[in-house]
Amino acid sequence: MENIVSREKLDRYFDLTTRGLAECRKAVVVGRESDSEEIFDMVGNYLSDAGHFDSEKGDMVLAFAALNYAHGWLDCGVRLGVFDVTDRDLFTIR
């Protein structure tokens, strides 16, 4: 296994995070809307950064890092009960 960020790996993580965001947007727990908006803002910022690093800077390593931060925010929201999701392929669920 190579320790590189390939186009395939980067595309897979863009897809994973984008799908995760879509799932979370449909699964906000009642009463946690304010928390979810803060998380969605951060995820959107990191997704934007990832796109910038990838397409404008050609830096797939920084793009990959930004995607991991984005998805980490989603996982945190899941673990803190902000989102009620069940997809174990997209999220770290207890």
Image: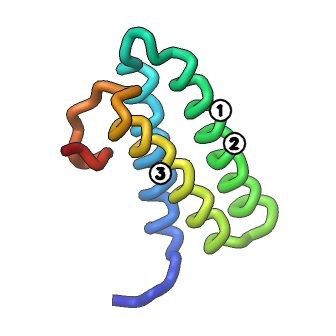
In the rendered image, the quadrant that contains the N terminus is bottom left
Residue that mark 2 sits on? 45
The alpha-carbon separation of the residues under discs 3 and 1 comes to 13 Å
Amino acid on which disc 1 is placed: Asp
Q: Position of residue 6 (x, y in %)?
A: 50, 75
Instruction: Give above or below for 30 relative to 45.
Output: above
Amino acid on which disc 2 is placed: Asn
Secondary element at tag 3: helix
In the rendered image, the quadrant that contains the C terminus is top left
Q: At 57% from the left edge and 65% from the top edge, which residue is drawn?
A: 64
Q: Position of residue 59 (x, y in %)?
A: 71, 72
Disc 3 or 1, which lies upstream in sequence?
A: 1
Left or right, 49 with respect to 28, comes to right
Secondary element at tag 2: helix
Numbered mark located on residue 41 in the image: 1
Instruction: Give above or below for 10 relative to 43.
Output: below
Secondary element at tag 1: helix
Amino acid on which disc 3 is placed: Gly
| Displayed quadrant of residue 60 | bottom right
The alpha-carbon separation of the residues under discs 2 and 3 comes to 13 Å
Marks 2/3 in contact by CB < 8 Å: the verdict is no
Numbered mark located on residue 92 in the image: none
Observer-nearest of 85 and 29: 29
Residue that mark 3 sits on? 72
| Displayed quadrant of residue 85 | top left
Q: At 23% from the left edge and 44% from the top edge, which residue is drawn?
A: 93
- Display colour scheme: rainbow
Closest to the camera, between mark 2 and mark 3, is: 3
| Displayed quadrant of residue 81 | top left
